[in-house]
Amino acid sequence: MLKQVADGVWVRQSEWVWSNAIVVRGEDGLILVDPGINGADLAELADDIDSLGIPVVAGFCTHPHWDHLLWHPRYGDVPRYATTTAVQAATDARERAQAMAAESATGIPLDLVARLTPLPADGNPVPGKLIAHDAHAPGHAALLLADRGVLIAGDMLSDILIPLLNPRGANQLAAYAEALTLLEEATQYADVLIPGHGAVAQGPEIAARLTADRAYIDALQQDREPLDDRLAQDWLAAPRQANLQHTRN
């Protein structure tokens, strides 16, 4: 079920890793940001959109990981935008993304996975300011809707996920630190933060998310074990080891 978190901004959360599908009202219609995850989620999101009575005019993908590359025929045959770097990465890894989607979820229209178009220079029809960086994934991008006080952060600033480095990326600690600086600047204009996974943050919680992610990255830079409450989740053991291995190689 869609939950309105700001003027013209709705969120629907899946049970799968607390994934957030985001609906944004633009000038000409709705923009779907990272819709997912299972086929049932995609179909129920389509039902929710129908109840709004506003057409979908575009999609937006924050980064080229399989769980952010999904779509459903009921959303329409509209452009699905991402940064140029993310589009190239998604195109190169399309078969792998389809395989991971088939393995990890059910009922996903695999032929629609990772069909992206570079976002035009003027950003239309996607509203807001694009904040691009290469932390976590190539061509990752957040969207700042300053007029509504909303920051859509992609897979950053989560209350359940630790910072996840791109194992194939170079200088990920520096990239992550730079990304956090960019996001911190953006949060000056945001009262609501929507991560790709986890709870929506409001008010002081936004700064707390930044502090937690920065402390985690600082610990990795200093080659010491991060102290982070999120690590109490057993399922993060493998990503945690991958981060440590990446930084020590």
Image (cartoon, helix red, strand yellow):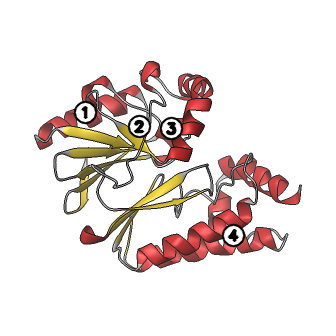
The amino acid on which the numbered mark 3 sits, given as a three-letter code, is Asp
Q: Residue shown at 52%/61% (left/top)? A: 158
Q: Earlier in the sequence, mark 4 or mark 1?
A: 1
Q: Residue shown at 16%/47% (left/top)? A: 28
Task: Mark 3 and mark 4 in contact? Answer it, CB < 8 Å.
Answer: no
Residue 46 is marked as: 1
According to the image, label 4 marks what residue? 216
Q: CA distance from mark 1 to mark 3?
A: 17 Å
Task: Mark 1 and mark 2 in contact? Answer it, CB < 8 Å.
Answer: no
Q: Earlier in the sequence, mark 1 or mark 3?
A: 1
Residue 36 is marked as: 2
Disc 1 packing (10 Å; few <14; some 14–19; many ≥20): some
Task: Mark 2 and mark 3 in contact? Answer it, CB < 8 Å.
Answer: yes
According to the image, label 3 marks what residue? 67
Residue 244 or residue 80, whichever sits in front: 80
The amino acid on which the numbered mark 4 sits, given as a three-letter code, is Tyr
Q: Earlier in the sequence, mark 1 or mark 2?
A: 2
Secondary structure, mark 3, is: helix
Q: Earlier in the sequence, mark 2 or mark 3?
A: 2
Secondary structure, mark 4, is: helix
Disc 3 packing (10 Å; few <14; some 14–19; many ≥20): many
Q: Earlier in the sequence, mark 4 or mark 2?
A: 2
Secondary structure, mark 2, is: loop
Q: Residue shown at 68%/51% (left/top)? A: 236
Q: Position of residue 212 (x, y in %)?
A: 60, 73
